[in-house]
Image (tube, helix red, strand yellow):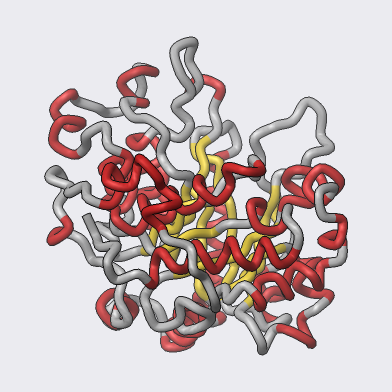
Amino acid sequence: MKTEKNISEILGEKAAYYLDYVCEKITKDQLQTPSKNSLDNVFVDSNRNPQVLRSLTQMYNHGNLGGTGYLSILPVDQGIEHSAAFSFYKNPAYFDPENIIKLAIEGGCNAVASTFGVLGLNARKYAHKIPFIVKINHNELLTYPNKYNQTLFGKVKSAWNMGAVAVGATIYFGSEESDRQIKEIAEAFEEAHNLGMATILWCYTRNDAFKTKKEDFHAAADITGQANHLGVTIQADIIKQKLPTNNFGFKEIGFGKYDDEMYETLTSEHPIDLCRLQVANCYMGKIGLINSGGGSNGKSDLIEAITTAVINKRAGGSGLILGRKAFQKPFKEGVDLLNTIQSVYLDMKITIA
């Protein structure tokens, strides 16, 4: 891993805003923060069996961030979720699934997350070289009008057979299908644990009512935080969530349980405080929160990715799961981007706020 980019220089005039902030609402001493001993501190007395702990250890000890308690995961399931042509037209090489795995390996990632098809086609060649995470459900894009639904694309046992160390799944909390998805994925996660695999939940929110005339609250800290809390309840070992973009979702849509004092007690307007509420909802950081990197916007990708990584780390999160910003670039540029993100988590000067 080689990176000479200075994080402060990348953040520019916002450097002090992100790097010097101290959380005074939910303080860092209340959290279980990532470290080389994270798995021992959290899971040794849990109901996870030794095989699950071994699978988690394989992920946490692999790649450039191995042994730090942090994760850098390359996820590429956009061929289904966003359509393959739209996802890969900027770099058609990734129609060939082997290149996805090569990018994760060369980029020093802890693991690669993708579909049954992508990983299954290359399992014998690569399953022992980088941890596989099989995404077991998807929202396919051909149904019109599109709906907020996730459908199982295969069996947990099939992921185990191909040598995967973990399964990933999405639940659209708030959607009409969420009850079925919760039940379905809870059962799938139980089976995965019984087989010795770890579990990662994409805790996304989907409901037209979450978007008001004033603002879109799908990524509000309070609503996504509750989605996280539901995710850890069905025993996800790692939570994936979008970085919060605002707050007061429950208050603005007039739904759920909320109190003005709750917002005053737990959060401020600072992005690190908003992300910390997400971490707190993951059992105060005992279940690792990885934030997503979002779509590719070209020249601003590096700044956006580094900003997300700094917010996640300083909030007490456990890393980044970033795909499009890396694979929609030439191979070497994708590797460099992943390495620069990883440098945030390796930089001891960037501390928990």
Residue lying farthest to the top in this orientation: 213
Quadrant in the picture for residue 300: top right
Quadrant in the picture for residue 288: bottom left
- Taking the spot 47% from the left edge, 49% from the top edge, the residue there is 241
- Taking the spot 66% from the left edge, 52% from the top edge, the residue there is 324
Quadrant in the picture for residue 74: bottom right
Q: Position of residue 26 (x, y in %)?
A: 16, 48
Determine if residue 114 is in view.
yes
Q: Is residue 35 left or right of residue 148?
A: left
Q: Position of residue 175 (x, y in %)?
A: 56, 33
Number of numbered discs overlaid on the protein picture: 0
| Camera-nearest residue between 348 and 158 | 348
Q: Position of residue 301 (x, y in %)?
A: 58, 47
Q: Is residue 73 left or right of residue 291?
A: right
| Camera-nearest residue between 13 and 127 | 13
Q: Is residue 224 above or below residue 351?
A: above
Q: Is residue 343 above or below residue 55?
A: above
Rendered-image quadrant of the C terminus: bottom left
Determine if residue 226 is in view.
no
Rendered-image quadrant of the N terminus: bottom right
- Taking the spot 73% from the left edge, 53% from the top edge, the residue there is 328
| Camera-nearest residue between 172 and 155 | 172
| Camera-nearest residue between 159 and 336 | 336
Q: Position of residue 156 (x, y in %)?
A: 65, 70
- Taking the spot 75% from the left edge, 43% from the top edge, the residue there is 82
